[in-house]
Image: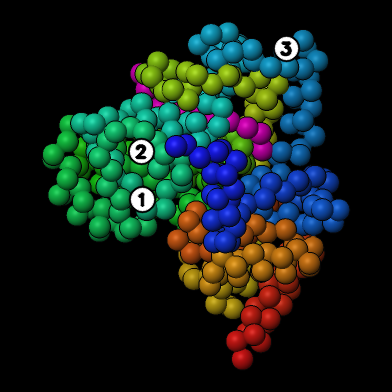
């Protein structure tokens, strides 16, 4: 006999709570710049992915206001294939394609929808996917939905990837190699030249998720692939990180975008984003191309914090990025450390298993963080480390 829904849910929630995996929808009210209000307290936000601060830029906000004032609808009214494909969609897709030098771009409502839709529609039971162990959940869910065989290689272990390609590639008609360029949890960078070389050698389609690198690297912020001179078969960028707005673009050939418009379920059956958000994205792209000073300021802060963390053994050697994972011994320790930092007016989110192999605090820097805020962060991290060492004596 089927148990009552409320009883079933109570048991499931109790299991999560006992394992320390309960997540809370915390209401963060933006206060301007990298500041938020949480539970009545003003905190410095070191959790947001608004890397360049464009989400609060008055020019981006005004672009959205102007679009609404021009008489466009507040909502799109339907999916892109029904009634929601506006001239603004075509304009912003052309703008993104031109900016990245791709033949076409197709807008999705989110980065998750883009990755899920691409992989789920492109691959099938006769295909195989080679995927980094630390790829984002949107990639993993797309792989599961595709029906393809999936081979996972250890994070950034390209010797292991080569071995898998040698063993498995010839057994399948189509193959996809998918990787993030800047990993959202680890904050480290993929070697895109090795990935391109392996894809060419073994006849594999190369897909790069540039969600976290777009806007921060390369000429005009075009991303790590552009910086490395790599042209993947499929590139995914988001508008919700460095652009500070919402949605994502799949960039590639005109045929790729035409196929996705016909077969990607997350595109076909999602209500389209409204035009005022697209207008904001358009302004963000303009500011992004002119944003060298913002990128320089961000990377200077990254170098400063990275040197501090490495000198105290909190992270190892790596390339510069704005994402800093501070590993914790357990989920409970991650929660305790986040609470400690919050008591010092620092907002950092604990990322817990099973989302990551080992619980961590993930610190994210923005170009808007000033020297005083960074000093408070370092001072607070030093206190946190001291408290841990004192507890272990």
Nearer the observer: mark 3 or 2; the answer is 2
Location of residue 302 by image quarter: bottom right
Numbered disc 1: secondary structure: strand
Nearer the observer: mark 2 or 1; the answer is 2
The residue at which mark 1 appears reads as 132
Give the extent of the magenta segment. Answer: 244-257
- Is 245 magenta? The answer is yes
For residue 99, the mark is none
For residue 144, the mark is 2
Q: CA distance from mark 2 to mark 1?
A: 14 Å
Q: Is residue 32 above or below residue 392?
A: above
Residue found at x 65% / y 28%? 281
Residue found at x 57% / y 61%? 18
Mark 3 burial class by Cα count in 10 Å: few <14, some 14-19, many 20+: some
Q: Are marks 3 and 2 in contact (CB under 8 Å)?
A: no
Numbered disc 3: secondary structure: loop
Location of residue 66 by image quarter: top right
Q: Are marks 1 and 3 in contact (CB under 8 Å)?
A: no
Q: CA distance from mark 1 to mark 3?
A: 42 Å
Q: Is residue 380 above or below residue 111?
A: below
Q: CA distance from mark 3 to mark 2?
A: 38 Å
The mark that comes first in sequence, 1 or 3, is: 3
Location of residue 283 by image quarter: top right
Q: Position of residue 61 (x, y in %)?
A: 77, 30
Q: Position of residue 391 (x, y in %)?
A: 64, 85
Taking the view exactly as shown, the residue that stands out farthest to the right is 40
For residue 72, the mark is 3
The mark that comes first in sequence, 3 or 2, is: 3
């Amino acid at each position: 006999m089927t148990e009552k829904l409320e009883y079933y849910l109570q048991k499931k929630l109790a299991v999560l709570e006992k394992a320390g995996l309960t997540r809370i929808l915390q209401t963060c009210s933006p206060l301007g710049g990298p500041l938020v209000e949480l539970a009545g307290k003003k905190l410095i936000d070191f959790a947001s992915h608004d890397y360049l601060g464009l989400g609060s830029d008055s020019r981006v906000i005004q672009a959205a206001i102007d679009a609404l004032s021009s008489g466009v609808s507040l909502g799109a009214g339907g999916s892109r294939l029904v009634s929601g494909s506006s001239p603004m969609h075509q304009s912003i897709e052309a703008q993104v394609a031109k900016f990245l030098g791709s033949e076409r771009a197709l807008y999705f409502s989110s980065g998750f929808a883009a990755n899920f839709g691409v992989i789920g529609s492109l691959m099938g039971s006769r295909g195989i996917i080679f995927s980094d162990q630390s790829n984002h959940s949107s990639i993993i869910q797309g792989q599961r939905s595709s029906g393809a065989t999936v081979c996972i290689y250890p994070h950034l272990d390209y010797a292991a990837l080569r071995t898998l390609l040698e063993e498995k590639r010839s057994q399948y008609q189509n193959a996809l190699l998918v990787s993030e360029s800047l990993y959202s949890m680890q904050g480290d960078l993929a070697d895109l030249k090795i990935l391109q070389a392996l894809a060419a050698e073994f006849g594999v389609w190369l897909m790069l998720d540039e969600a976290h690198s777009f806007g921060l690297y390369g000429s005009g912020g075009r991303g790590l692939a552009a910086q490395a001179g790599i042209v993947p078969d499929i590139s995914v960028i988001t508008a919700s990180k460095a652009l500070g707005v919402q949605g994502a673009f799949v960039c590639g050939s005109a045929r790729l975008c035409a196929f996705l418009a016909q077969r990607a379920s997350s595109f076909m059956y999602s209500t389209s984003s409204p035009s005022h958000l697209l207008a904001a994205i358009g302004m963000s792209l303009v500011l992004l191309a002119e944003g060298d000073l913002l990128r320089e300021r961000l990377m200077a802060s990254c170098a400063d914090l990275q040197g501090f963390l490495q000198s105290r053994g909190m992270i190892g050697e790596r390339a510069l990025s704005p994402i800093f994972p501070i590993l914790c011994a357990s989920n409970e320790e991650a929660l305790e450390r986040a609470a400690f930092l919050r008591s010092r007016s620092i907002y950092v989110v604990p990322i817990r298993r099973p989302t990551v192999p080992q619980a961590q605090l993930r610190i994210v820097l923005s170009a808007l963080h000033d020297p005083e805020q960074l000093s408070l962060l370092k001072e607070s991290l030093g206190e946190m480390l001291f408290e841990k060492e004192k507890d272990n004596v």
